[in-house]
Amino acid sequence: MMDKDIETCFAALIAIANALNLDLSFKKVNDDVINALYAIKNSQDVQIWIDTLRQDKALVVPDCAVCEHPCGRTSEVYLNEKDESKRRHAYQLIEELDSLSLNDIYQRLCECSF
């Protein structure tokens, strides 16, 4: 099982990755995603990144917060509720973080949601 704060940070990361749909034009959001991943990698407090990523998602897909019929595409995905392979996939992303492109990072985060 993942630590609760790390799981919540990954949930926010997965949600923003799905919200972006591989659109790399949001520089601040991209920087926040990378910083959050490095906070996980370096065992730093991730609470500020959870809040930041949730704010970023609201900027990227503002209508999702008030949607009357949410589709779930940008919902937070909690990895402790998924099978072990999804958690391993997330940790592998952290281990390989230095060698991945931004596009690869987003693709791997999206893969954690299904």
Image (cartoon, rainbow, N blue to C red):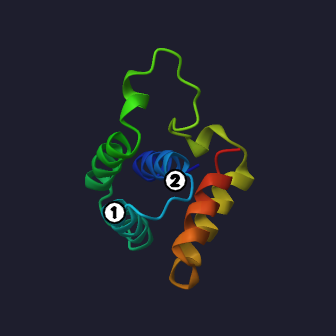
Q: Residues within 10 Å of mark 2 (few under 14, many from 20)?
A: many
Q: Residues within 10 Å of mark 1 (few under 14, many from 20)?
A: some
**Residue contact between numbered discs 1 and 2, judged by CB atoms under 8 Å:** no
User: Helix or strand or loop: what does disc 2 sit on?
Assistant: helix
Vertical comparison of 29 with 76: above or below = below
Question: Can you give x and y, in whole percent of width and height, for residue 26 in the image?
Answer: 37, 61
Pointer 2: what residue? 17
Q: Is residue 12 above or below residue 25?
A: above
Residue lying at 28% horizontally and 46% vertically, measured from the top left: 51
Image point (63%, 37%), residue name: 81
Q: Which mark is residue 88?
A: none
Q: 14 left or right of 40?
A: right
**Residue at x 56%, y 59% (from the top left corner):** 22
Task: Check disc 1 and report the residue beneath it.
Answer: 32
Whole-angstrom CA distance, mark 1 to mark 2, is: 12 Å
Q: Quadrant of the C terminus?
A: top right
* Residue at the far left in the pictured view: 48
Counting from the top left corner in percent of width and height, residue 104 is at 61, 70
Mark 2 residue type = Ala
Q: Nearer the viewer, residue 26 or 93?
A: 26
- Measured as percent of width and height from the top left, residue 69 is found at 53, 17
Horizontal and vertical percent position of residue 47: 29, 51
Q: Amino acid at mark 1?
A: Asp
Callout 1 secondary element: helix
Q: Which residue is drawn at the image coordinates 59% and 26% (left, top)?
A: 71
